[in-house]
Amino acid sequence: MALPAVLAAGMCVGCDNEVDDVFDRSATQRIEAALAECDAMLQDAEHGWRFDYTPSNSAMVNYVMRFHDGRVSMENAEGETSESTYKLVNAEGPVLSFDTYSILHELADPSEQPYGTGKGGEFEFIVAQVTEDTIYVRGRKSGNAFKLSRAPLGEIHHVRLEAQMDVDGGRDIAFFHTLQAGGQDAATLFLGDDKRSLDVTTADGQSRNVPVEFTADGFRFTAPVAVSGASVTEMKWDNSLKTFVTPDGNVRVAEASNSPFDLGETVELLLASPYYKMNGASAAITLQLVEFANAFPGWQRTEFFFNADAVVDTLKYKVDTQEQVTELGHAQGKAVLNSMSFVVDNTYGLPEWGNFTVKRTEQVDADEVVFVEGIRNGAPANTLNRNLFLKNIKGVLFDSRGVTVVARKGKFYVVSSSEPKRWLILEPQPLPQPAMVIPTLIVQ
């Protein structure tokens, strides 16, 4: 089904009154028939539709929606339910509109934080393309692309398991999860790469990937998992606890505040590579990076050096009142680098990049974080002193309680030991040369 093609054909037919109508129905009739066919498709899905939607000011929200006779019921990952009326209309293109207030509309409510704009959501979507199992839409206000996918049995529980455990999904969740029995952590859980399995490490140290099958009530392990002497095969969603529990209530999926791993070997793996780029972060840190990118639109990347033997250039230069840069001196030496650097565009027109650097040995001050002014490959930098966004990011690595390091999928997850909802994702890279340039800035 190609709604845009139908609409385009309709518009072209109406362009010239001298051209005979080659169709047996008018453009309006054809458009109405296409919209009716799309509506029938929405209602025909036995288990509804999964709608993955990202408002402009927030992280992705997932719904499962069921359409019937002009009304749509919806559920989200948190167990909230809602109903709205809906309609499919021709309004500068085919538009799916949700008409009465629902949990979808909450994302567009300006009375929600941040006040005045809310989460930047919308509730009218232009239908761009329709296939047998997918409806592609664009936000009528934002133009951003999304999709509704025909849902299999138990898809809402698939949504909930992802939301609860996907550490790469940009949600506000804890990093570590366990199967908990009697309040004690009995098996460590990670969501599998396919998001339809769980990596399970039991108390005896044995690890394996166990596929799961989603049901109307929750999910089943395809092979039993041993938990505190019991064999667990089935988990059901408990909406009051907002988690999955066994039918007898004795075992539940829970967040773990501390790492369940012996991490000495993992830390050694991390320190074996001298240079990393940050390729992801938890929701809390991602929001800080978004704020930082708004304040410093020239930000390009964040990089880390661990015990990196490197050549360090020391430059002296001055900047006059017209921001013209004059180099005063240049010397080279060797150093071992342990630092976090925020690479930004060069505002002075000199080659390569500027950066902001904080040394790993710097003392933590509760009121102020002083970032060392630095340059890379000859490009001057600005100061980030008292920058609250980077102060929060810095807190992951420089917290007085240290960090937990987990190696997964060829990347390292550096998790704050004091706050398990804060982590950085580091990926090893070849060491750049020179690794760092430290200047002395003289302003005239």
Image (cartoon, helix red, strand yellow):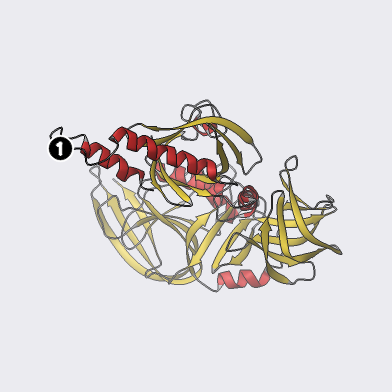
- In the rendered structure, the answer to whether residue 151 lies left or right of residue 24 reads right
Q: How far across and down, in percent of the image, does residue 280 sit? A: 50, 56
Q: How many marks?
A: 1
Residue 260 figure quarter? bottom right
Q: Is residue 401 above or below residue 287?
A: below
The quadrant the C terminus occupies is top left
Residue 65 figure quarter? top right
What element does badge 1 sit on? loop
**Identity of the residue drawn at 54% across and 51% down:** 394
- In the rendered structure, the answer to whether residue 173 lies left or right of residue 90 reads right
- In the rendered structure, the answer to whether residue 202 lies left or right of residue 161 reads right
Please name the amino acid that badge 1 sits on: Val
Q: Is residue 309 above or below residue 23?
A: below
Q: Nearer the viewer, residue 92 or 67?
A: 67
Q: Is residue 337 visible?
A: no
**Identity of the residue drawn at 33% across and 38% down:** 30
Q: Nearer the viewer, residue 411 or 237?
A: 237
Q: How far across and down, in percent of the image, does residue 91 sit? A: 35, 31
Furthest toward the front, the residue is 24
Look at mark 1 in the image and give the residue it sits on.
19
Q: Nearer the viewer, residue 291 or 202?
A: 202
**Identity of the residue drawn at 30% across and 53% down:** 346
**Identity of the residue drawn at 50% across and 42% down:** 42
Q: Is residue 8 above or below residue 113?
A: below
Q: How far across and down, in percent of the image, does residue 21 sit? A: 21, 38
